[in-house]
Image (cartoon, rainbow, N blue to C red):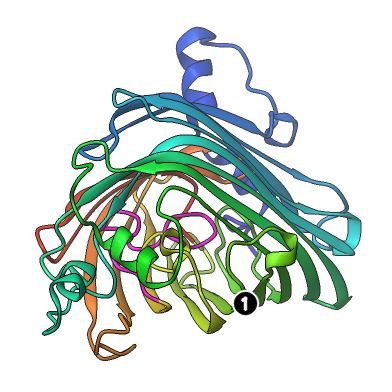
Amino acid sequence: MAKDSLGKDSVKRAYDIGDLIHQIFRPGKPLKPAQKESGITPMPSIAYNPSIGAQIGLKAVAGKVLGNEPHTLMSIAATSASITTKGIIYFYLSHNVYTPGNRWNFQGSLVAAKTVVPDFGLGIGAKVSGTPEQEILANPDRKVYVIHGEYYNFKEKVYKQVMDHLFVGAGVSIDIRRKLIDKDHPDAVTPYQVYSEEHGLKTNHYLSNGFLFNLQYTTRDHQNRAYKGIYADAGLRVNQSWIGSTKNAVQITTDFRKYWSLSSKNPEHVIAFWNWGSYLVSGTLPYFELPGTGKDANFRSGRGYTVGYFKGTDYFYSEVEYRFPITTNKFLSGVTFFNIQTANDNLGTKLFQKWQPAGGAGLRILFNKATRTNLAVDYAFGNFGARGLFLGLNEVF
């Protein structure tokens, strides 16, 4: 049977940014074997949107298998540091490490930022009939308020494999927001202020610290760019004041992903499905920790809308994407996608009652064939005139 794109022979035949640079600066000299190439992929980070201004920085992704394939999944790490014309400084470091034989899995991240948080209101953009404060909170026209502040996050989870593909895990997450203020409209009443005052939260700072308990099942063939398999994770988060959380809360999260390869010869033809949800069982979550658009672990959901565009105490999101190769050497590929989301607002609109769609298409540029790392460039649009260009490393899910 012929080797397909999952095999090492196909990896060698693939063409990435490293090959392009080699061809330009070292023409005529032999290429290094793919398996000996660096698993580290650095790249500049350039972006723009009205909330943050123009952004420049550096990103890097690393991938390495720490045991014997196929019995050990690839471990990956990523980091980024950037600054914008509006004075935003953002740094993060994340990792997803599998020890030999997948006996243990370590997932974590560290974030430190002087940033702005766009505030579009609570819920899914549904109109409400209530007090002036409730109308401000629902913000049915999605008027944007921009809250400046500092954000720090530390998260670490440890999973133990209890049987093939099944892991149980526990960890901790610490979220700190400080010096929160709307510098442009310091006297305006914002949805964030209304929500915080209703729930007895200070408007300039809070902490959201909790314990994490997770059950994970995974059969996907690759962490960066899966062609086949399933990833599922169900989690329980318990915020407790005795470990510094401003409020107590119990929250359930679910994350399900399924990948179907449509061709044995060209497995890059993939239909991918993603569902992510979060549900408040009890207690109070601070406003900017409510689940919503782009609030998944990697901040990639809801292409077409800004992070936090829709949010609620309960949130449900689904997306389907078709991925396909463009060039025979795998250097360029493309995607088309459609997503839909719903949230409650505790003002009369319940979960699943109103939906907001978005969709678009994108280009993928292969940066490192050994680790299937690519640059994702997507254009997406949704309701309320929302649209934009979304850049990132690796697939969205």
* Quadrant of image for the N terminus: bottom right
Pinpoint residue 136: horizontal percent, then vertical percent.
17, 67
In magenta, the rendered stretch is 295-312
Is 272 situated left or right of 107 in this image?
A: left
**Magenta region, mostly helix, strand or loop?**
loop
Is 349 situated left or right of 234 in this image?
A: left
Q: Would residue 163 be visible to someone looking at this image?
A: yes
Q: Residue at x 80, y 60 (%)?
A: 105
Q: Residue at x 71, y 69 (%)?
A: 212
Q: Residue at x 35, y 25 (%)?
A: 87
- Where residue 217 sits, quadrant-wise, is bottom right
Pinpoint residue 296: horizontal percent, then vertical percent.
49, 63
Task: Report helix, strand or loop for mark 1.
Answer: strand
Query: Is disc 1 surrounded by few (<14), some (14 to 19) or many (20+) residues within 10 Å?
Result: some
Q: Judge whether 273 appears above or below 173 on screen.
A: below
Q: Which residue is mark 1?
A: 232
- Where residue 244 sits, quadrant-wise, is bottom right
Front one among 225 and 291: 291
Pinpoint residue 137: horizontal percent, then vertical percent.
23, 69
- Residue 176 magenta: no
Amino acid found under the numbered disc labelled 1: Ala
